[in-house]
Image (cartoon, coloured by chain):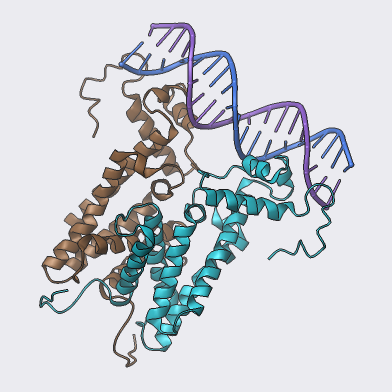
Chain colours: A brown, B cyan, C blue, D purple
DNA sequence: ACCTGAACACCGTTCAAGT
DNA sequence: ACCTGAACACCGTTCAAGT
């Protein structure tokens, strides 16, 4: 995304592109999971640079975390995009694809997801580009709802509102999943797939039913 | 819950029931919202006690936070209980009641909710009583699903699985709500009520529809 | 323009010592 | 049994100084 390596890496003094390296190291630490909350000095150490160096690129820790979150949203959006591209253009399949992408992403990057959505470490409102990145994800939900409505397969209603409900279910499922709050049926890859089907089905047809007759299943 | 004040508050040396006072002060700081992440020394200061005093009651910060979370889950369970008691015994009403209780609780105690579900500050597995407290909340979902099934108003399926989906939607909605991720239609009390209806409706009848004919609404 | 090193305030945790 | 005070390691942030 950033255009900093188009020059042939002059490596002028100590580090060619420190800002980028810091973010990368931060994401790395996040995947290693050692991060209760990211530690600026540890990140600097990992990059092999003085701890005060980062202050040239980020005014404070919160800004650094915001940059991490932003990258996280970009990757999440990419994952969703890829999933939608590899799935038939029917509302149900799209819904299922987006659900699967979301849950698998969360399972693959639990600490990143926690960082992105904890609400503890940064005020999202204060960082407009971060807000934009999160909207990027949100847009997919709106798109899926809209296309479903055009095909007459999704109920009427303001697409943004319905998209919010959709996101809510995916997000809640993702978070409870990585907090191991829905064991044992959601452990491992097969468990996730089971959860995907459950969520999709619920989103599509709901939990209630009209007919009172009992049916076996 | 703890039986420490049945003696007539002897106030023996400096503080009669420090453990309880620390938790109370922590919850207080959480409601004041100044808490990016709780600060043991600040809590001690608020209680008017030395910062090392808390280490007699909690082995470390994480244990203290676990106690806070536990209290949070108890309060959440209580709020849900109250809501269910004041609502007709039909599955739809119960679903709506539980949804409303969850969202209102989150809106009233955003920092507590973030703390409880961030997953950043404590490992929930390590604290069995905390785990039990969260199950206390989970049980309500299972109950609602089961009763709905008994009345033939909820689809077949393992109650725990369906309850997980239910919790997912509520939880995601609550978190996105307090992160202001679903503005503008969910600001203020009327906005929350709108969200409650949306979530309940979606849970009950889903987003999809079979009939292709267009209907105005 | 970009980075280092020393310095400061502050937090989590420990431990010997107080009542 | 319950609490204090000094002490230590470590983090976020600043600032004068280096290249």
Please name whichever residue, B115 or A16, is drawn nearer the observer in this view of the structure.
B115
Quadrant housing residue B100: bottom left
Q: Is residue A180 visible?
A: no
Relative to B215, does residue A162 appear above or below in the rendering?
Answer: above
- Residue found at the far bottom of this picture: A213
Out of A127 and B137, give the one closest to the viewer. Answer: A127
Compared with B196, C15 (above or below) is above
- Could you say where residue C5 lies in the image, as x and y percent from the top left? 52, 14
Identity of the residue drawn at 47% across and 54% down: B110
x, y percent for residue A79: 26, 50
Residue A128 % position (x, y) = 30, 40
Question: Residue A211 at x, y = what percent?
Answer: 29, 89
> Looking at the image, which residue is at 51% across and 79% down?
B85
Q: Is residue A80 left or right of residue B189?
A: left
Q: Is residue B197 visible?
A: yes
Left or right of A60 in this view: A167: left
- In this rendering, the answer to whether B150 lies above or below B210 is below
In front of the other: A15 or A163: A163
Q: Residue at x 33, y 53 (%)?
A: B181
Quadrant where the N terminus of chain A sits is top left
């Amino acid at each position: 995304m950033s255009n900093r390596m188009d020059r042939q890496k002059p490596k002028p003094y100590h580090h060619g592109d420190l800002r980028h390296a810091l973010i990368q190291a931060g994401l790395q630490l996040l995947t290693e999971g050692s991060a209760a909350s990211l530690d600026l000095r540890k990140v600097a150490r990992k990059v092999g640079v003085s701890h005060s160096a980062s202050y040239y690129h980020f005014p404070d820790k919160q800004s650094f975390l915001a940059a991490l979150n932003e990258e996280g949203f970009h990757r999440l959006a990419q994952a969703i995009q890829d999933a939608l591209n590899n799935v038939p253009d029917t509302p149900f399949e799209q819904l299922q694809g987006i659900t699967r992408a979301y849950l698998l992403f969360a399972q693959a990057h639990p600490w990143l997801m926690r960082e992105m959505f904890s609400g503890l470490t940064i005020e999202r409102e204060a960082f407009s580009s971060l807000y934009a990145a999160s909207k990027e994800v949100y847009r997919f939900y709106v798109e899926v709802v809209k296309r479903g409505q055009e095909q007459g397969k999704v109920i009427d209603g303001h697409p943004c509102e319905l998209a919010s409900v959709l996101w809510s279910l995916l997000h809640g499922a993702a978070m409870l999943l990585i907090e191991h709050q829905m064991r044992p049926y959601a452990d491992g890859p097969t468990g996730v797939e089971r959860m995907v089907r459950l969520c999709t089905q619920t989103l599509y047809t709901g939990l209630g039913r009209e007919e009172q007759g009992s049916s076996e299943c």
